[in-house]
Image: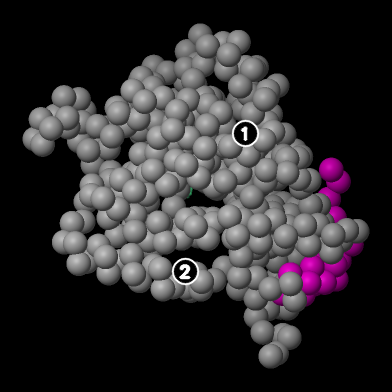
Amino acid sequence: MSTTAPIPFMRLTLGADDAALREGIDRVLASGWFILGPELAAFENEFAAACGAAHAVGVGTGTDAIALALRALGIGPGDEVITTPLSAAYSALAVMMAGATPVFADIDLDRLTLDPAKVEAAVTSRTAAILPVHLYGQPADMTAIAAIGRRHNLAIVEDACQAHLASANGRPVGTIGAAGAFSFYPTKNLGALGDAGAIVTNDAPLAERLRRLRNGGQTDRYHHVEFGVNTRLDEIQAAVLRARLPLLPAWTTRRREIGARYRQALAGAPIIVPPERDPGHVYHLFPVRSARRDAAQADLRADGIETLIHYPVPIPEQPALAAIPSLPCPNANRVCSELFSLPLHPALTDDEVDRVAAAVQRLSAADAVGG
Ligand SMILES: Cc1ncc(COP(=O)(O)O)c(C=O)c1O
């Protein structure tokens, strides 16, 4: 085997999941039932159990999961939702889909998630909720954020789209706030073969309302009691997710092993490695920071190593959000110009991790940035 084969950022070809996945799809094809059937019901039970939650409600995307969780909690026009400027823009777009206004509080430079002091400072009489994002698989500081929520009587919806099976201070993410939103986009720690998402909650009436909202607001067939949307996790994707869910604990262990191996091998490298602040981190991504990001990425590319940027633009700076005024977010602005992500997925071998780390160690010392 060549030791210089390119290392792509991600591999989405089938592995240990292959047989179970094809079996699941065949089961659905044979059943002739494609929407809101037994596969989804079973997946919802299995995913809720895996998350330590009482209920899971499958929806079409992680974005819809966030938007519907907010709506089911009664949050909408006139309400402000405090969230992070550093995330997939979908986090904030989902707030806007619910009709509410995102208010951006800056990030903590270590965790790269919401800074609780900035959240506290952003609370106004219109604040209705906080949407922390467990970014890159690292939980936000939920102890401090939950305390702010209690003090100001705010709902908390966790964006756990990158944090399947993560825990914050030992508590499963998604179960700390009123609801948690997950994405099963194909590249996620648990991915479908298309778009899919889910909301978990311990609140039975909330789960009931979410089941209605995802299905056009219907109670019975063709009886629409409220303004819902059409966003259902279909039977084929549910069967795919059921095939993969039993593998998720081992995949998560492998992600953590790779994270630990990178941390050790990158000691002293001319980049900043954001620290692990909670052992419940599930390493969806492995971001590092460099003052000379373009050069660093180009050098790694020359070594056959593909890296990506998560994320190049702070959400408040996106043209799509130009109409929304934002508090200053200097930390987010800074890291968006420095961050890039190294390959990390369960199929990455130790040899590949070592090759990536060695290439990063060879980057110019001028790439380092101050903390
Ligand atoms: C943190 C975060 N929130 C929300 C989303 C939206 O999820 P989806 O792509 O399933 O709509 C994603 C993924 O894109 C994400 O990474």
Of residue 346 and residue 130, the one placed in the foreground of this image is 346
- Corner quadrant of residue 73: top left
Report the side of 118 relative to 133 (left or right).
right
The kind of residue on which mark 1 rests is Arg
Res 177 visible? yes
Q: In the rendered image of this protein, does residue 20 appear above or below residue 114? A: below
Q: Secondary structure at mark 2?
A: loop
**Residue 318 at x, y percent in the picture:** 51, 42
Residue at point 35%, 39% (across, down): 57
Residue at point 85%, 67% (across, down): 361
| Crowding near the residue tagged with mark 2, few <14, some 14–19, many ≥20 C-alpha atoms within 10 Å | some
Q: In this figure, which residue is indicated by the disc labeled 2?
A: 17
User: Which residue range is magenta in the image?
Assistant: 352-371
- Corner quadrant of residue 368: bottom right
Q: Is mark 1 within 8 Å of ligand 1?
A: no
Residue at point 52%, 11% (across, down): 153
Q: In this figure, which residue is indicated by the disc labeled 1?
A: 171
Is residue 102 rendered magenta in the image?
no
**Residue 359 at x, y percent in the picture:** 80, 72
**Among numbered discs 2 and 1, the one appearing first in the sequence:** 2
Q: Main secondary structure of the magenta part?
A: helix
Q: In the rendered image of this protein, does residue 297 appear above or below residue 188? A: below
Q: Secondary structure at mark 1?
A: strand
Report the side of 126 relative to 340 (left or right).
left
